Image (cartoon, grey):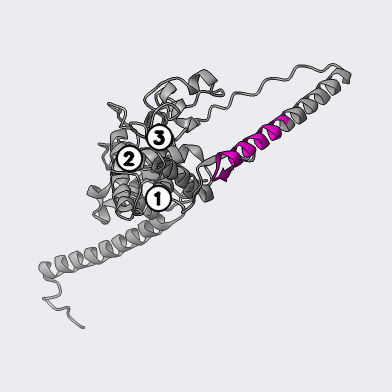
Amino acid sequence: MIRRSRRARHPLVIVGNAIFTLIIVLAVAAGGALWIGKKRFEAPGPLQDNKIVIIPRGLGIKEIADVLVRESVIDQPLVFMGGVLVLKARGGLKSGEYEFAKHASLADVVDTIIENRVVQHTLTIPEGLTSEQIVARLLQNDALAGQIKEIPREGTLLPETYKFTRGTQRAAIIQRMQQSERRILQEIWEHRAAGLPIKTPEELVTLASIIEKETGRPEERTRVAAVFVNRLKNKMRLQSDPTIIYGLTGGKGSLGRPIMKSEIEQHTPYNTYVIDGLPPGPIANPGRASLEAAANPARTKELYFVSDGKGGHIFSDTYEQHQKNVAHLRTLEREQSAQKGAAESAADAKTASDPPKAAPVPAPADSRARP
């Protein structure tokens, strides 16, 4: 008969074996739990489509999980919170506006938040808007915050596309526009052509703003600039229609109608039909291309230009040729008016011959902002 060792039956040995067994069981269980948790953490989530979610400031890990569950981004808040704790990323959860991809896993969601990959908004400011019009656009953008205390000086804002995150202060965007304008203006001023009748960078901006309002065609900017530079050199008045409009509206926008003859002769500080040289300041915020055109105009002797009726202009060196171009434009306008009238008459005649129909519901007015 084999006797058991007294040592094997010792209570301390029995307890030690039990503890060791328990540790092994717990380790296996923990490993299994971690493996299951990892699989759940990396599994595709419930989101059916890409979705933008705003996480407000001041929320804790549980409140953030609640927001994500409510928005159907996640459906396992405990696994989300556990993953954040395992990654030691609790302090890295940031408020903001986030876009989560379709079926984003919990791992993807956590990465998006702790890496602060917030949604980038864009604001495009077209060339040629006045400062008042730019401020109006900023106030209409509901992704921006805060008020604007005063209208920036005309010509100090650079038209461009700006990126920002939700909640950015409008005043901060204004500051960025002003900094960009100063940087670009200094660069262009340092590379301006010799012999320009422009004494200061501010005068360059004024001339560029007139060029900006006179043409929207890139290929014409340097020629328009040359016309105004040549007229300044020859002590001729600039006679630019946009300066009349600015003098009448004060930068609030267009007249919404043709300029009247009395307004051409009306004295305002900006009306270049009645004042000599440049107006006292810019009439809009010019873009980089117009600033460069003002600083480096084409080498021509042209002193006049008039619309070609097709969105561009016809240029000339002499007043006689200019008069012929104007006459051609008037003939073209009369022909277009006659064609329009004939088309409207034909439409009216067809309407009169058609059987009566129910009155159509009027389309909503176009509410897009325009320069």
- Marks 3/1: CA distance? 16 Å
Residue 364 in picture, x, y percent from top left: 61, 23
Residue 36 to residue 268: above or below: below
Mark 1 vs 2, N-terminal side:
2
Is residue 63 among the parts visible in the rendering? no
Residue 209 in picture, x, y percent from top left: 41, 38
| Numbered range of the magenta stretch | 314-334
Q: Residues within 10 Å of mark 3 (few under 14, many from 20)?
A: many
329 falls in the magenta region: yes
Residue type at tag 3: Ala
Q: Give the residue number, with chain letter if any, for mark 3.
A: 284
The front one of 184 and 119 is 184
Residue type at tag 1: Glu
**Closer to the camera: disc 1 or disc 2?**
2
Q: Secondary structure at mark 3?
A: loop
Q: For the N terminus, which image quadrant?
A: bottom left
Residue at the spot 81% in from the left edge and 25% down from the top edge: 347
- The residue furthest bottom is 1
Q: Magenta: predominant secondary structure element?
A: helix
Q: Secondary structure at mark 2?
A: helix
Is residue 80 among the parts visible in the rendering? yes
- Marks 1/2: CA distance? 13 Å
Q: Give the residue number, with chain letter if any, for mark 2.
A: 203
**Closer to the camera: disc 2 or disc 3?**
2
Q: Give the residue number, with chain letter if any, for mark 1.
A: 292
